[in-house]
Structures are given as structure tokens and as C-alpha cells.
Amino acid sequence: MSQFNDVAVMQAANIHYDGFVTSRTVIFSDGSRKTLGIMLPGVYEFSTTEKEVMDIYSGLIEYRLADAEWQTIQGTGQFEVPANSKFQVKVAEVTDYCCS
């Protein structure tokens, strides 16, 4: 899917790590949400309360789920993060992502 139709976009940005990770929340007519964002090069850790699916549209990152080995995505890819857990990313190139 290259675009979302019939959605609302929150005006306020989600800003993390002094602006090195930013996103905007997109709200769908059924109430579901996604965030569209950019990660600049660096190393970051995030926590989840719900299961998340990270779709990578471009960039170069390594990611590690709790107690797992580092995995690499160059270009496009996807990974899932369980609810109530943490994950780490090492961003080597500006990375365009969508979190569901």
C-alpha cells in the first residue's frame, strides 16, 4: 500500500531521542492507528505495551528483540515486536518506517 485513504493525521509530532526519531500518528476510520516516521543514524531502544509491526520502507537498520540476535534490514522489510517488551535498533542510514 503506497498511501492511506480517509484518515486523520495528528498535527503534533512524536519526537524521541532529541529529534533523531520522529513520527506522526495516522488514525483510520475504524479507530486503529499507525505511526509514520523517520529514524536518523544512531542507536535507540523502545518499549511496547501492545504488539507492534514495524514496516521498513527504506534505510539500513539492525534490530534486536529481547534476548534475540541482531537482524538486519536493508531497503525494505518487516519485523514484529511482542506486547510488553523492548527492542533495540541500530540505524546506519536514514530509515523510513511505519509502526502498526
Image (spheres, rainbow, N blue to C red):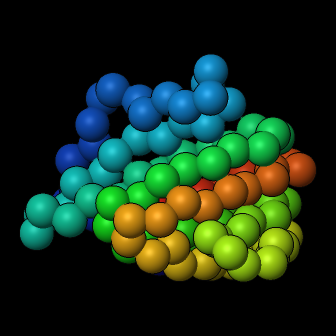
> Going 30% across and 29% down the picture, which residue do you hit?
11
Image spot of residue 61 (x, y percent): 80, 60
Q: Which is nearer the eye, 72 or 13?
A: 72
Asked if residue 59 shows in the view, the reply is: no
User: From the viewer's perspective, is 83 left or right of 64?
Assistant: left
How far across and how far down the image is residue 44, in percent?
A: 69, 44
Q: Residue at x 41, y 30 (%)?
A: 13
Residue lying at the far left in this picture: please name it.
30
Number of numbered markers: 0
- Toward the right, the furthest residue is 92
The answer to whether residue 74 shows anywhere in this view is yes
- Residue 82 at what x, y percent from top left? 45, 76
Looking at the rendering, in which quadrant would you find the C terminus?
bottom left
Vertical side of 91 occupied by 6: above or below: below
- Residue 77, by quadrant, is bottom right
Residue at x 51%, y 73% (from the top left corner): 81
